[in-house]
Image (spheres, helix red, strand yellow):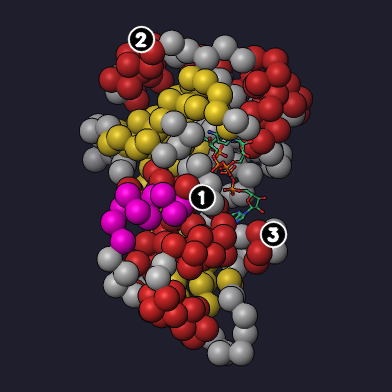
C-alpha cells in the first residue's frame, strides 16, 4: 500500500494578535520540516475489528487526532460517501510509523490528522477541495489547515484557519526536543493571565512580509515566540535545556535552529 508522509512543522515566529473565546488569534510563520515525518498507510485488517490505528501512541484510539479526523470527516459526508468511508475503515487499519515526537510543538498529531483526511479523499475519490478539508480539519485542531495545504512555508492567521503561502526557500533545521510533556492549553492560559500583549496590525504586516531567515537573524527566541516566556514560567525545567541561538517552536517543548540552506 502507498506510504504517505506527514511532515512536522516549526513556528519561525508566533505572535498573538487577540483573543477569540478560549482561543487566541495568532500570526505565525509555519515552515515544513523536510527531514522529519511520520509515515501513514492503509493496511488490511480483520473486518470484525473496530476502527484501528497501528502505531506507538501514548493516547487511546478515541483521543487520537486520526480517529477524531475520521469522525469529523464522517459527519461532513452525505450518506453514500459516508458508507464508502465506513467500508474502507472496516477493511483497513491506519498504520503509523511515528517519528515526530509528541508534546513537541512540531504538530505531529495535527499532521497525522491532515494526512489521514487527504488519504481518504484520494483513495475514495471524495472530491473534497483543500478548503473543505481544511474546515473539517479545523474542527479537530487549529494546526491542521496548514498541513492540509502542504505549503513549504506559510503565514498562518486566525486561530489557524487562515493559511497564506509564503514563497521562500525551505530551510534545513536542527531540532531538539526536551522530554517535557508540555500542554498547549496550559501555555496559552499562562500567556493570557500573565503576558497578554497582542501586537498591532502594522507589526503583523511587517512580519508577514519578512523572510524566515531574516526573522531568525533579527529576533531573539522570546521576541519571535510569544509562548516562550509563558512556557518557561509553567515548566521551569525548560530553561535548563535552552541554548543560545535556538528558537522555540509553538507551545514547545522543541527548540530549533537553521542548519544550512537546502540545496
Ligand atoms: C501552539 C501551536 C502553534 O502552531 O501549536 P503546537 O505548539 O501545539 O504544535 C497552535 O497554536 C496550537 O494548535 P493545536 O495544538 O492544533 O491546538 P488545538 O488542539 O486546536 O487547541 C488546544 C488548546 O490550545 C489553545 N489554543 C489553541 C490554538 C489557538 N490559536 N489558541 C489557543 O488558545 C486552546 O486552549 C485550545 O483548547
Ligand atoms: N496522531 C497523534 N500523534 C501524536 N500525538 C497524538 C496523536 N493523536 C493524539 N495525540 C495526543 O496529542 C498530544 C500531543 O500532540 P502533538 O501533536 O504530538 O504535539 P504538539 O501539539 O505539541 O505538536 C498528546 O496528548 C498525544 O497523546
- Residue at the (52%, 20%) spot, across then down: 18
The residue labelled by disc 3 is 59
- Residue at the (59%, 75%) spot, across then down: 52
The residue labelled by disc 2 is 202
In this rendering, is residue 220 above or below 131? above
Viewer-nearest of discs 1 and 3: 1
Cβ of mark 2 under 8 A from ligand 1: no
Q: State whether the magenta stretch is mostly helix, strand or loop.
A: helix
Tell me where the magenta segment starts and ends, as one range.
128-137
Circle 1 residues within 10 Å: few <14, some 14–19, many ≥20: some
Question: Do tag 1 and tag 2 residues touch (Cβ < 8 Å)?
Answer: no
* Direction from residue 178 to residue 247 in the image, left or right: left
Which of the two labelled residues, at mark 1 and mark 3, occupies the earlier sequence position? 3
The quarter of the picture where the N terminus appears is bottom left
Residue 86, position as x, y percentages in the image: 49, 78
Question: Do tag 2 and tag 3 residues touch (Cβ < 8 Å)?
Answer: no
Query: Taking the image as drawn, is residue 96 in sight?
Result: yes
Is residue 244 in the magenta section?
no
Residue 22, position as x, y percentages in the image: 63, 32
Disc number for residue 139: 1
Which of the two labelled residues, at mark 2 and mark 3, occupies the earlier sequence position? 3
Quadrant observed for ligand 1 in the rendered image: top right
- Residue at the (55%, 20%) spot, across then down: 226
Amino acid at each position: 500500500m502507498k506510504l504517505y508522509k506527514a511532515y512536522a512543522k516549526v513556528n519561525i515566529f508566533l505572535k498573538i494578535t487577540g483573543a477569540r473565546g478560549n482561543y487566541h488569534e495568532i500570526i505565525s510563520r509555519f515552515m515544513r520540516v523536510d527531514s522529519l515525518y511520520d509515515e501513514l498507510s492503509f493496511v488490511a485488517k480483520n473486518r470484525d475489528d473496530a476502527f484501528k490505528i497501528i502505531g506507538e501512541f501514548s493516547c487511546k484510539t478515541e483521543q487520537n487526532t486520526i480517529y477524531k479526523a475520521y469522525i469529523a470527516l464522517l459527519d461532513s459526508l452525505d450518506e453514500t460517501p459516508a458508507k464508502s468511508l465506513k467500508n474502507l475503515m472496516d477493511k483497513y487499519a491506519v498504520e503509523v510509523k511515528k517519528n515526530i515526537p509528541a508534546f513537541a510543538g512540531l504538530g505531529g498529531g495535527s499532521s497525522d490528522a491532515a494526512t489521514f483526511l487527504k488519504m481518504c479523499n484520494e483513495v475514495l475519490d471524495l472530491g473534497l477541495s483543500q478548503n473543505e478539508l481544511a474546515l473539517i480539519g479545523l474542527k479537530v485542531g487549529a494546526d491542521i489547515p496548514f498541513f492540509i495545504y502542504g505549503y513549504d512555508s506559510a503565514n498562518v492567521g486566525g486561530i489557524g484557519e487562515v493559511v497564506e503561502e509564503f514563497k521562500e526557500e525551505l530551510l534545513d533545521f536542527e531540532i531538539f526536543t526536551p522530554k517535557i510533556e508540555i500542554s498547549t492549553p496550559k501555555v496559552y492560559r499562562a500567556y493570557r493571565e500573565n503576558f497578554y500583549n497582542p501586537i498591532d496590525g502594522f507589526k503583523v504586516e511587517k512580519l508577514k512580509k519578512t523572510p524566515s531567515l531574516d526573522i531568525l537573524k533579527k529576533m531573539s527566541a522570546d521576541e519571535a515566540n510569544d509562548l516562550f516566556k509563558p512556557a518557561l514560567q509553567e515548566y521551569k525545567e525548560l530553561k535548563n535545556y535552552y541554548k543560545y541561538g535556538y528558537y522555540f517552536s509553538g507551545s514547545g517543548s522543541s527548540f530549533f535552529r537553521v542548519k544550512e540552506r537546502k540545496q
